[in-house]
Amino acid sequence: MRHAIDTSQSDGWGFEMPHQAAEVLAKQLVLGLPEPLRDVFVLSRFGGLTNTQIGEQLGISPKTVEWRMTKALAHCAAQLRR
Amino acid sequence: MTSPKVRVEAAETEAAAWHARLGARNVSTATIEEFFAWRAAPANAEAYRRVEKVWADTGPLADDPAIVAALDAAMSRRAGGERSDRRPRTLLGLAAVGAAAALAIGGWTWLQARTVFATGVGEQRLVQLADGSSIRLDTASRIKVRFAGDRRLVDLERGQALFTVAHDPARPFIVEAGQAQVTAIGTVFDVRRDGKAVRVTLVSGAVDVAPAGEGRAVRRMVAGQHARVTSEGLTTRVADVPAETSWTDGRIVFRDTPLRQAVAEVNRYLTAKIELDAASLDRVPVNGVFRTGDRDAFVSTAAQVFDLEASPGPDGTVRLSARKNN
């Protein structure tokens, strides 16, 4: 008997998805973001900066940081639909 | 501009906003109820799962060269900015936290009498010491600080702490943690008490670790190493530094962590804990990133992925058990 690939698990959360594939896709999504969104996303996710610190770094308000972060995440998430 | 090919649905935008909102330090019950109501719509639940997936899948990318380059580019976006030489990656966050705390606490006077610092379950706290060192306390932790002329002594009585030690060769910084003694001169390291064992992760610099008693055979650790001290002695391995210090920015990182252990880890931050009642899944490896204290995200993810049933238990606990009719 062959082991079927359980797609119900891989589309759920990534516990079971091979790391490499999920990471490569995630990387493409991040690098494919428009620059203003990508800057905010990488500073928050990988730089560990707060919204206030990101705002200071980029010369924008914390509110704008928050909104761009939301848009960046939404944009990446939307691409996982396909 | 976003690619015209991809229509970002309202659900994704709302999901991303919820993700940010739920990541705040304090989330009110009303907010959580509002979130549940929103997520009751299947399309919203799907969108939220996708946002969580993006978050989790990007976690391991911190050391990826292309991502590091993107971060460097973002850090140097302002020409002539005074921060252009700041180092990216994990330490950047720590440095930023330290600087912010120094600003916030700068006006205070250090009280010698105040030498015991503790956190409750789910709390974190940054303690700034008189010598310029700082200690970040994780959930349910307690330290006692004793500074003498020739040494700086800190007792980690329970829990976990990240030490950023100000350089002072004349006064070694010594952390006592049950079975282990860690001596630093100027460095960043994490010490965690785990039952009877003590775990040390060295982020930068060098420290000496010695098991208590038995002649105190000292071992010099190098950056990126993880040491575990038990009554049997001391073992070292390569540390997963971002994962082991992820708690400092409010996240727990799992990399092939057995499910039982992942639940225990999440529970460290919860007063109303998760009870895992699915023995066959105890050792199943899980990967992902969760916010400390975000019980719901963990429970719903684990329930979904492993087809478990989440049901309320006594005292606000939640029980994850195998479905009966499987």
Image (tube, coloured by chain):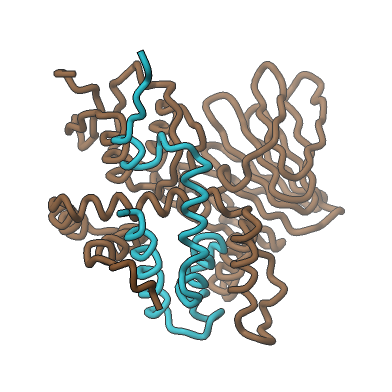
Chain colours: A cyan, B brown
Q: Nearer the viewer, residue B130 or B58?
A: B58
Left or right of B215 in this view: B49:
left
The quarter of the displayed image where residue B14 is located = bottom left
For the question of whether residue B25 can be seen, the reply is no
Q: Quadrant of the C terminus of chain B?
A: top left
Q: Relative to the observer, which residue lies in front, B1 or B87?
A: B1
Query: Considering the image in quadrants, where does the N terminus of chain B appear?
Result: bottom left
Q: Is residue A8 visible?
A: yes
Q: Viewer-proximal residue, A63 or A21?
A: A21
Looking at this rendering, what residue extends furthest in the top direction? A1
Using residue B322 as the reference point, say whether residue B219 is left or right of it.
right
Residue drawn at point x = 76 percent, y = 30 percent: B210
Q: Residue at x 28, y 21 (%)?
A: B277
- Residue furthest out toward the right: B170
In this picture, is B194 found above or below A12? above
Residue at 53% x, 42% y is A20
Q: Which picture quadrant has residue B178?
A: top right
x and y percentages locating residue B187 in the rendered image? 74, 52
Asked if B264 appears above or below A2 in the picture, the reply is below
What residue sits 86% from the left and 53% below the top? B170
Q: Is residue B213 above or below residue B25?
A: above
Where is residue B50 shown, x and y percent of the image?
32, 52
Q: Nearer the viewer, residue B201 or B104?
A: B201
Up-down: is B82 above or below B256?
A: below
Q: Position of residue A34 (x, y in %)?
A: 46, 74
Image coordinates of residue B258 in percent, x first then y, are 46, 27
